[in-house]
Amino acid sequence: MIFSGPNRFFLFISDWGIGKAVIAALAISMIANSLSFAPISRAQSQVSDSDIAFINAHWPDTISLQGPAPANYSALEASLAPKDCGACHKTQYDDWKTSIHSQSMGAGVLGQIINFVESNRATARICWSCHTPLAEQQNVLYKNNAWISNTEFDSQLQREGLICAACHVRKHQRFGPAKFDGTMSTIAAQTKLPHNGFVEEAIFSKSIFCRKCHQFDDRGYKLNGKLIENTYNEWRDSKYAKMGIQCQDCHMPNRRHLWRGIHDQDMVNRAVEIAIIPAGNSRQTEEALETLITITNSGAGHFFPTYLTPKVFVRGYLADTAANMIEGTFQQTIIGRDASLDLSTELYDSRIPPGKTLKVTFSHQIPDNAVSLVVSVYVEPDHFYTKFYKRTLEGHGSPMSKSLITQALQQSMQSGFSIFQETIMLKQ
């Protein structure tokens, strides 16, 4: 299962041609270590006791059934459907519809989970804990050490992923951030206000609020000594945390419910600075060229990229007078972290920490017909997904599952984009 957090990511491999022993080991490790469910401690979070208490209560493994709505609620107020929230909160709803959060139970995730609902419910529950955390979104519930049928299950609500209520509603009570200036309102929840008002919590504007789905517990699954999912800790250890810059400041500017990340070209452009030493200063002789390309993580508050799934390709080649690539001159460096599909081995980790720079050197003999060097940087947000979906389709699975995975594969192969391209004329 590849968890996209909601852009975030860890992975369970199903038994489609990968090996049940590996699956069992991963599932047992992840469940035993309570990756999504572990309570937060002061040492982990460096936040206040009240923040810790709120988060541990607000984000359990499964958010309890809402139960009967207050008697004075209208059908609209009692609804958990995002479109009904949008009746009053139109801007937030319109933003959410375009976000990764609204796709957190997309074809790729659902195509895997439907195989777990009956055969491996513990794994399904871990998937649901971030992708569809409300009890109303989960096919079955775990109570008193037993699995029970969920009579309140809403399949449409499940397909809508991380919905408004997942963050903002508990037992039909609404929660949200304080005013923009950080002060708390003196107006308590009142029956005269829609849905009896709401409870203000400053923690909605703090990075710790995002931790549950964007950080493994310290005991969680690791490769080469590093957690598979470590985004919150990467931020916590960066200059941004010390400066008081929160996840929401970049991913929810002006409280927009957009959560843009690696899939968004503008967001990626703002995260990095790319420079090439001008050709006049490059080391070029009549026979050879050596040019330095630098990629600086100047704007991301975590590693660039932070997860296993995306890859960034720094490419260079020599071109002729017709701008065609000269055979044998292509060179490529990959920025990212990769692992074997069974998560047993880290293949490489070339990610760039906040504020750091990766230096790439293009070096090649100059053919007689070469007139320019072409450098590009290309982002594939779903690179690991693409490999995983292809492998999945080689194995066994239900027709519905294979149909969903095929759809997800097509989407993943269309998610790439270029963030940089420059042609440098060679000295003649």
Image (cartoon, rainbow, N blue to C red):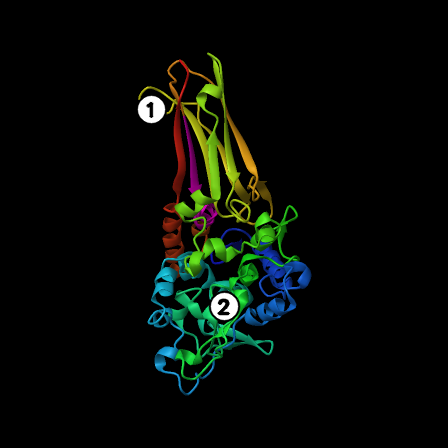
Q: Amino acid at mark 2?
A: Ala
Picture coordinates of residue 356, whole percent (x, y): 57, 39
Picture coordinates of residue 53, whole percent (x, y): 62, 70
| Residue 390 is one of the magenta-drawn residues | yes
Decide: is 350 above or below 86.
Answer: above
Question: Looking at the image, can residue 397 be seen?
Answer: no
Labelled disc at residue 178 = 2
The 10 Å Cα crowd at callout 1, few under 14, some 14 to 19, many 20 or more, is: some
Decide: is 50 above or below 358.
Answer: below
The front one of 305 and 275 is 275
Q: From the image, which quarter does the C terminus lie in?
A: top left
Picture coordinates of residue 173, whole percent (x, y): 47, 78
Labelled disc at residue 153 = none
Rendered image quadrant of residue 419:
top left
Residue at 51% across, 63% down: 130
Q: Amino acid at mark 1?
A: Ala
Instruction: Check disc 2 and report its element: helix, strand or loop.
Output: loop
The 10 Å Cα crowd at callout 2, few under 14, some 14 to 19, many 20 or more, is: some
Picture coordinates of residue 48, whole percent (x, y): 64, 65
Q: Earlier in the sequence, mark 1 or mark 2?
A: 2
Residue at 41% across, 57% down: 258
Q: Which residue is mark 1?
A: 323
Q: Nearer the viewer, mark 1 or mark 2?
A: 2
Rendered image quadrant of residue 108:
bottom left
Decide: is 178 above or below 306.
Answer: below
The part of the chain drawn in magenta is 374-391
| Residue 56 is one of the magenta-drawn residues | no
